[in-house]
């Protein structure tokens, strides 16, 4: 079925179309990303940034647009004959995360595709094999994978807003799983008679009259979990109860601490909690931090600091409000440079909660349900 679809599209232009030369561009390996923000709005993407129309066909190009975007100022608009391909040449082992944001207008009543291939060469109909064909069906209002060799449970199509589509691909074990808006809906083998490789991404408009938009597309090594090894109170705050088990699992059992008077006018009542992690990767590119917690009152602020092992100082990386309702805050894409100790992979994270005033003379209490770090 997959091969038939492509043979028809290639040969529709006659024998000459079937004999197209291979693309001049040879794509690279991961990590890789494109958010289309460095290009001019309205940029023809054929031959730009490693993108080519299918089989090096200029008529299958697509254009950047600012009509919709997840990150400013541009996204890519896939509509009509758009069949835009990005190739890779060395993603052949390991675990990978392929992620994009997708925007489907509520007026779309057709079917548009996001496709990943494990074998692909422009102009060579015998060197291509599909791993996944996720379709966005505006008539049936579903998202699913119509590849016959995978298990796919349709999920509701979400329109008029940006939604994450995410692949978790394990080339070492020939498996993958796809998530839409955080919900798993596809599982299956990756190679399917082809190769254990991520060879190409294809944004196919399927001759739709209504566009679908993509933004913030990336292929990166899958996150690894750093191990929480220790915790300590900083220069302010007291420990009331709980330990590593309470901090390591999101299970509504809590590590509880209480504030003390701070040194700064901006932190008159504060808790300093220092967390130690061991990274399985000594040289990651990025870190992702998650903290699940609450206070026993409203009006709090949390600030996250990571230790710089070059300067031995803590650097501010994030600030957010907190109150009496438990929240989970995640921040990814944090540079890991100088924040993972080269000798042993240690990461130190200081999380500070403070309020301007407290409802009790004893100070405020913090209830931590989970802390975690992923490394990439």
Image: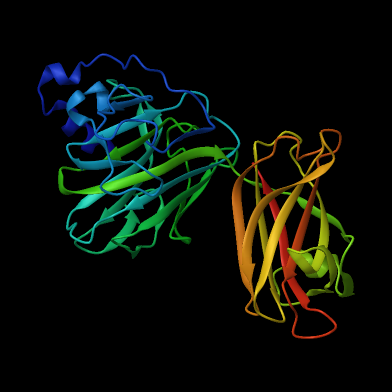
Q: Depth check: give the residue in front, 159 or 109.
A: 159
Q: Residue 195: x and y, percent?
A: 47, 31
Which residue is found at the position 29% from the left and 33% from the top? 84
Q: Residue 148: x and y, percent?
A: 34, 49
Q: Is residue 155 visible?
A: yes
Image height check: is 51 above or below 324? Answer: above
Q: Is residue 86 left or right of residue 336?
A: left
Q: Is residue 1 visible?
A: no
Residue that lies at the very extreme toward the front in this rendered image = 265
Q: Report how many numbered discs are placed on residues in the image.
A: 0
* Residue 76 position by quadrant: top left
- Quarter holding the N terminus? top left
Which residue is found at the position 69% from the left and 71% from the top? 293
Q: Residue 59: x and y, percent?
A: 17, 27
Q: Is residue 151 left or right of residue 171?
A: left
Residue that lies at the very extreme toward the bottom in this rendered image = 360
Q: How is the image coloured?
A: rainbow
* Residue 85 position by quadrant: top left
Q: Residue 371: x and y, percent?
A: 73, 61
Q: Depth check: give the residue in front, 281 or 368.
A: 368
């Amino acid at each position: 079925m997959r091969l038939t679809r492509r043979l028809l599209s290639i040969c529709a232009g006659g024998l000459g179309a079937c004999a197209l030369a291979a693309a001049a561009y040879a794509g690279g390996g991961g990590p890789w990303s494109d958010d289309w923000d460095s290009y001019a709005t309205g940029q023809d993407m054929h031959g730009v940034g490693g993108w080519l129309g299918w089989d090096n066909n200029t008529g299958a190009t697509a254009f950047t647009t600012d009509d919709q975007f997840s990150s400013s100022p541009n996204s890519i608009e896939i509509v009509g004959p758009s069949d835009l391909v990005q190739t890779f040449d060395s993603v052949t082992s390991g675990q990978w995360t392929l992620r994009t944001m997708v925007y489907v207008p509520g007026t779309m009543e057709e079917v548009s595709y996001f496709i990943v291939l494990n074998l692909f060469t422009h102009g060579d109909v015998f060197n291509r094999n599909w791993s996944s064909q996720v379709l966005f069906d505006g008539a049936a209002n579903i998202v699913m994978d119509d590849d016959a060799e995978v298990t796919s449970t349709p999920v509701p199509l979400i329109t008029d807003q940006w939604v994450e589509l995410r692949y978790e691909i394990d080339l070492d074990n020939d498996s993958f799983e796809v998530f839409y808006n955080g919900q798993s809906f596809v599982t299956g083998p990756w190679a399917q008679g082809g190769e254990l490789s991520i060879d190409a991404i294809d944004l196919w408009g399927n001759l739709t009259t209504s566009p679908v938009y993509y933004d913030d597309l990336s292929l990166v090594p899958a996150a690894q979990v750093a191990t929480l090894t220790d915790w300590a109170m900083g220069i302010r705050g007291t420990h009331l109860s709980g330990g590593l088990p309470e901090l390591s699992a999101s299970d509504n059992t809590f590590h509880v601490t209480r504030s003390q008077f701070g040194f700064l006018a901006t932190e008159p009542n504060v808790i300093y909690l220092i967390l130690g992690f061991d990274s399985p990767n000594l040289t990651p590119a990025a870190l992702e931090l998650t903290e699940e917690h609450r206070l026993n009152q409203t009006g709090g602020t949390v600030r996250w600091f990571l230790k710089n092992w070059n300067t031995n100082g803590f650097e501010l990386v994030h600030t957010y409000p907190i109150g009496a309702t438990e929240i989970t805050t995640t921040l990814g894409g944090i540079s890991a440079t100088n924040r993972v100790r080269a000798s042993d992979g240690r990461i130190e994270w200081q999380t500070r909660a403070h309020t301007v005033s407290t409802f009790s003379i004893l100070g405020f209490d913090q209830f931590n349900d989970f802390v975690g770090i992923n490394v990439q």
